[in-house]
Amino acid sequence: MVTAGMTLLVYGVVRAAVSGWGDRLVVAALTAAVVLLALFVAAEARARQPIMSLGLLRDRNRAGACIMRLLLTAAMSGMMFFLTLYVQGVLGYGPLETGLAYLPTTLTVIAANRAVPGLLLRVGPMKVMVAGSVLAIIGMAWLTQISATSTYVSTILGPVLLFGAGHGLVSGWRRRRWP
Amino acid sequence: MTDLPAGEHGSASGLIQTMQVGVPLGIAVLVAVYETVDGTRVQSLAGAFTGALVLSLLMLATALTVFRTRRRPCI
């Protein structure tokens, strides 16, 4: 149910960009997606051994962290997808150079992630999450200034470093093992 | 995840996997924005990044709304 629901949801959103939100197939796909995902939640709520216990979401901080992780994953995967098109199609990078261009992102994700346990103890989850979000916002806002004449150093390196640091802070919440 | 009730660790793993639906969803949303922008390919790319910027703003809104206390995360 969840796989079919998500497939129809993604199909509906992508098709809507081409055919418009009023297209009959778009409406049918999105409606079916909502129904299937609602049925999945209902089934999980009744199951004796659910795949995903809905009780886990009763904790406010945990539910919020999950929503943020979902949004972060959506923003980052979309950014990587289109940035790859840019560096290969506009800057003319090959696959290996493209991979190396993203390497600084990985390093900042690791560095920020390692700092999270200490930061959580010192300032609490809210400030860590807000700081991570603000870094991601600055990076993404910088990236919207991209143009045909941009270079890797002037318009890509800074944003991916900032977004990587934000990613590390926001996703670090699940790395900490509490006593 | 040490403070989860017994038997909940598998569910927590499922929960984390469920959040990975953000991958296809994020790409789909940004593709929709990309296709909607009426301009050159690079302008459409910038439009797609604006979509990602909106997702990041929603992240900040969630952080400001949800995390009001200094309670420790449970996972």
Image (tube, rainbow, N blue to C red):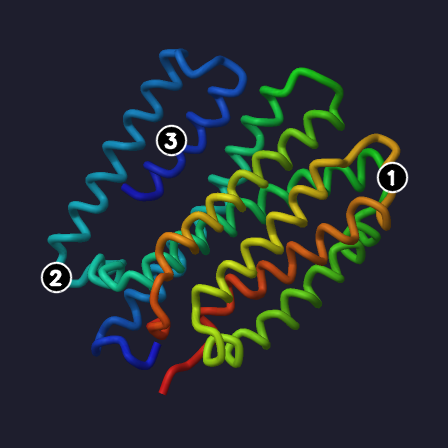
- Circles 1, 3 touching at the beta carbon (< 8 Å): no
A66 left or right of A171 in image: left
Tag 2 subunit: A
B5 left or right of A148 in image: left
**Secondary structure of the residue carrying numbered label 1:** loop
A91 left or right of A26 in image: right
**Secondary structure of the residue carrying numbered label 2:** loop
Tag 1 subunit: A
Counting from the top left corner in percent of width and height, residue B63 is at 43, 55
Task: Name the residue: 35% across, 56% down.
Answer: B66
Q: Please give the label number shown on residue A16.
A: none
Which amino acid type is marked by label 3? Answer: Leu
Determine which residue is flagged by label 1: A92
Give the answer, above or below, for where A8 lies relative to B15: above
Report crowding for label 2: few under 14, some 14 to 19, many 20 or more residues within 10 A (C-alpha). few
Image quarter hosting the C terminus of chain A = bottom left
Determine which residue is flagged by label 2: A48
**Sequence-wise first label, 3 or 2:** 3
Task: Evaluate whether residue B75 shows in this view.
Answer: no
Which amino acid type is marked by label 1? Answer: Gly
- Circles 3, 2 touching at the beta carbon (< 8 Å): no
Task: Evaluate whether residue A61 shows in this view.
Answer: yes
In space, the residues marked 2 and 1 are separated at their CA atoms by: 54 Å
**Sequence-wise first label, 1 or 3:** 3
Tag count in the figure?
3
Task: Name the residue: 22% across, 57% down.
Answer: A54
Q: Do labels 1 and 3 share a chain?
A: yes
Residue B50: quadrant of the picture? top right
Give the answer, above or below, for where B6 lies relative to A51: below
Determine which residue is flagged by label 3: A8
Counting from the top left corner in percent of width and height, residue A25 is at 38, 16
Counting from the top left corner in percent of width and height, residue A4 is at 34, 37
